[in-house]
Image (spheres, grey):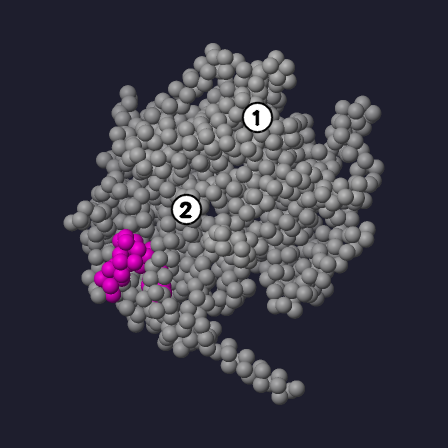
Amino acid sequence: MKVLATAFAALLAFNAQAASELKIGFLSTLSGPAGGIGIEIRDGFNLAVKLAGGRLGGLPTEVIFADDTLNPETGKQLAERLLKRDRVNLMTGVVFSNVMLAVWPTIEESKVFYVAPNATPTTITGKGCSPYFFSASWPNEAHHEAAGAFAQSKGFKNAYLIAPNYPAGKDALTGFKRTYKGQIVAEQYVKLNQLDYSAELAQIRAAKADALYAFLPGGMGINFIKQFVAAGLSNEVQLIVPGFVSDQDVVRAVGDPMLGMFDTSHWAYDLDNDANRKFVAEFQKEYKRIPSLFAEQGYTAALIIDQAVKDAKGKVEDVKAFRAALMKAPERAKTPRGPFKEAANGTPIQDYYVRALVKDREGHIVNKKISTILTHHQDFWLKDCPMK
Amino acid sequence: MKRAVAVFALLALFPLVMQSMDGLFYVSLASRILIYAIAATSLNLVLGYGGMVSFGHAAFFGAGAFVVGILSVEGVRSAWIAWPAAIAVAALAALVIGAMSLRTRGVYFIMITLAFAQMIYYIFVSLKTYGGDDGLSMPGRSTVGMDVNLRDELTWYYLVLALLALVLYGLKRLVHSRFGRVIDAIRENEARAEAIGFPVYRYKLLCFVISGAVAGLAGALIANQSNYVSPSLLHWIQSGTLMIMVILGGVGTLWGGLIGATVLLALEHLIADYRIGWVASLAPNYQDHAGLAIGIVLLTIVMLAPEGIAGLFRRRHA
Amino acid sequence: MSTILFLEQTLNGVQFGLMLFLLAAGLTLVFGIMDMINLAHGSLYMVGAYFMASFVQATGSFWLGLPLALGATALVGAALEMTLLRRLYGRDHLTQVLATFAIILIANEAVRIAWGSQPIMLNAPPSLTGPVTLPGGLHYASYRLLIIGVGAAVALALYFLVAKTRVGMLVRAGASNREMAIAMGVNIRRLFTIVFALGAALCALAGAMLGPILAVQVGMGENILILAFVVIVIGGIGSIRGALVGSLLVGIVDTSGRAFLPLVFSAFLPPQLASAAGPAIASVLIYLLMAVVLYFRPQGLFPARG
């Protein structure tokens, strides 16, 4: 009996070392006004898995999708189901930071690695940093710091700021103010998923600022831009946004009123490297549309998982081995934004560009790269993370 | 009585069966259902027995949850302090809201209770220090001492089951007491009860407060269930869901809350997670549209069983 | 605070109020005449918006799509009334609540099946995507002016219909005393179906007009439904005049609250707190308004039943 038990235990111990297949829990916002973002990330992720023949890191890969509908409570319940019932060995997908904050305790407790294709809240990258968190997107405030630097470089004397009233929204405006040294005329917070901006637009008009910085993701941005232009404000104030408010998903919904806007991003569709050209071409072939930065983030997340699982020889449950592989993966995987480093708190160190909304030769509205505004930029909150 | 023993025996065996099948996740789901059963039963007291259609019950449910959540984040994690506090706060809220609302009747009572609940909802949503819209993550479940660990799913389930039994027993005693008979009389004909000399307003208010207090207990439990409190617990849709559970299970019946909560929540879960072959062959994507199936089932029940599911059983025994 | 800001916010409040009126009018008639709580009213609003988006895409014209959407939704409303809702008259309110709640679930899923989970695009007609210069120098979105115009026109038309036509007289009779109306030989069944279809068309108009400003998405009816109920309670159940006054009150209070309270609070609170407290208190204001009105007039401002 004892022999059997020992043998059994030994077998279990061996099995715990290397996974024989990858079960990835993809928890994202796939419906509702902000659902377009989750779908873009999902499409990018799926493309990478498909190009890898359905095997990331050489292991047969199953991706289980769950829709949090931008509800932190739903997200938490779904995370529990993915982790406890479906027994996934990797998690990814969350779009919004409020959902991320609700599900993170459950993920960390389950000792499962999470690769972020979007939401990278500062509470998890600062004091609360953890070896199980790895971001394949960008530090929360980076795009906003880039935008602030851009507004500063263009000489706008004053700026009006607007963002939704949730963790990422507050971080966004804090980031902008860090690099912009002009006068802040107003700092306005709207309800998350608010759709009618008549009241706010009236105040923006009355404030008479030079520049308007708006962080309004998903459907919020679509409505805001439409209403902004309808109110005739595009002639009165220069609109600057972070890249994820004005990328292709919004372009498809709004169209011409967007011409003339500037945005900041860690990636542009016309970046000059082979991996990016391949990504854009394959994406257009598969989905018949130009990828947005969200799609690139999903694609890169999958590439990083692929590289890390390969390098760690499948040991996704071994915290030291897999963490080490993840940290090296961005330099080794051929991601569309080029090779980049990862900081100790699990956030990318990379360049940021300014893009303009213009028409290309075929008449499509694209986010064309104009200049590089920040290089080798790292997360401001890296200093708070005790991990080195 | 025999029926009650049978039901609770089944409920008590359930987690042991699940554990042997490696289905601890389902024990957690069942605990959630039982907690909602307590909340729905508390609503049934005031709606079914008391005849007061309160559309703001989520206020007491959510208030109880937030008391536990806020105390836990501030370092007070003992259930012996937090849970009575939750019940007390919910009862107080019910006292205040009831005192003001019970002066109105009919659809106006419905709207006033809704209004007060929404006001509380908006206050909590704007309380950014305690999470606001995003909700509040708790460090862990309440502690009871005595080496009992509530983090263990089975222990937690049995505690919730025991509390449900207590609530149902209490309701049964209350309904058959003098208080219960007066409330019954008031529901049937308020003018006559008043004419006989009963202080109708006071009885209704007391009924409202008791109902609120029990809802507060359910709230304390739901906060512990997910280790997370969200203002959506206070929203009118939550009030509506509780009402649906009561109506579905059987208005004014002892088991109505438990039946309604079980049917609604289990239905949601089953449809999403279990593929029924023949339905799938007709509509391969049907699981993405659970709401349709639930809506159809609800509609059928309401058309065919006017007194709720418990009402179906009642008629047979008549 | 400038006069332009004040003018703009007041216009916004009137715009929102008139849209609420379109929803509240149908709701109050159905509740007043058929004594039925119809939670699915918001679903008709949603269906109207979706039909509008589809017809505009199909015909390429906003103006062609509008009557098509109204007609289609009125048909859906009539069909719903004749098959399901008719069986709910006379049942107690709780049963009606449960049944119409089930219809909300079914409608949401049916829309999701037919049109997908993503919000679909509905844009203002190309001629109205820019601003119009009003006296005083205010550039106001021309589309919002259209909404105000349409809302006011409908209010006038409804007044005419209810006060000056035979159908309107039957509606008023039914609202103030249903039993007597039946006793007097009114074909109550047909009247009910007509009233319901009219209410559905009004919902569709609101959905179609608001679609370009708000997103057209599944579940868009539930949020506005609660406001519609508040409006009819304030206005008095069964009264169109009450619905108009109530919705203008609610629209202006809500919009002004959302606009001005954060300004007031930011004078002595940090911006994040001011921005959270402002809209929160503004939402509470509506319910306070309702509580105050009910305190002085327990049956609402203009109850239909005398």
Residue hosting label 1 = C31
Residue C100 in percent (x, y) is at 56, 36
Residue B24 to residue C140: above or below: below
Vertical position of residue A20 compared to residue B309: above or below: below
A351 left or right, relative to C193:
left
- Judge left or right: residue C143 versus residue C111: left
* Residues at marks 2 and 1, CA–CA distance in whole angstroms: 32 Å
Q: Residue at x 28, y 23 (%)?
A: C134
Query: Could you say where residue C42 lies in the image, as x and y percent from the top left?
Result: 49, 34
Q: Which residue is mark 2?
A: C116
Query: Residue at coordinates 66% horizontally, 27% vertically from top-left?
Result: B105
Magenta segment, principal secondary structure? helix
* Chain hosting mark 2: C
Residue bounds of the magenta highlight:
A275-304
Residue A367 picture location, percent across and down: 24, 51
Q: Secondary structure at mark 2?
A: loop
